Amino acid sequence: MRNLRVAAALFPLRVALFVRADSAIHSIADLRGKRV
């Protein structure tokens, strides 16, 4: 799992969004316009 990082941790739901380490997504705002 070295190639992953957490882009967003959503509380209190205990949900996290993982993206590839080389992804341009660094926050939940970076998801705008992306297909999830």
Image: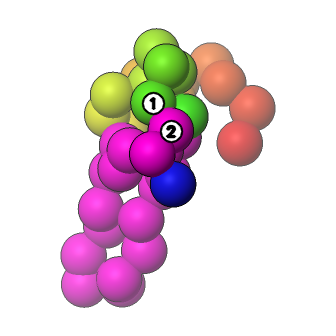
**What secondary structure is found at the residue carrying circle 1?**
loop
Q: Residue at x 50, y 38 (%)?
A: 3
Is residue 13 shown left or right of residue 2? left
* Residue 24 x %, y %: 46, 15
User: In the rendered structure, are the residues bearing label 1 and label 2 in contact, judged by CB atoms less than 8 Å apart?
Assistant: yes
Residue 11 visible in this rendered orientation of the protein:
yes
Q: Which residue is mark 2?
A: 3
- Dot 1 crowding, Cα within 10 Å, few <14, some 14–19, many 20+: some
Residue 36: quadrant of the picture? top right
Q: Using the image, determine if residue 24 lies above or below residue 2.
A: above
Q: Position of residue 8 (x, y in %)?
A: 33, 51
Residue 21 tag number = 1
Magenta stretch: give its range.
2-19
Task: Verify whether residue 18 appears in magenta.
Answer: yes
Q: Within 10 Å of the Cα at label 2, are there few (<14), some (14-19), or many (20+) other Cα atoms? A: few
Depth check, front residue: 26 or 32: 26
> Which of the 4 image quadrants contains residue 34?
top right
Q: CA distance from mark 1 to mark 2?
A: 5 Å
Image side of residue 28 versus residue 21, left or right = left
Query: In the structure shown, which secondary structural element does the residue marked by tag 2 occupy?
Result: loop
Query: What secondary structure is the magenta-colored segment mainly?
Result: strand
| Image position, residue 5 (x, y; %) | 38, 44
Which residue type does callout 2 highlight?
A: Asn
As shown in the figure, which amino acid type bears the numbered disc 1?
Ala
Is residue 18 left or right of 7 when viewed as pictured? Answer: right
Residue shown at 35% from the left, 50% from the top: 6
Mark 1 or mark 2, earlier in chain: 2
- Residue nearest the observer in this picture, 26 or 1: 1
* Snapshot quadrant of residue 16: bottom left
Q: Residue furthest front?
A: 2
| Residue 21 lies within the magenta run | no
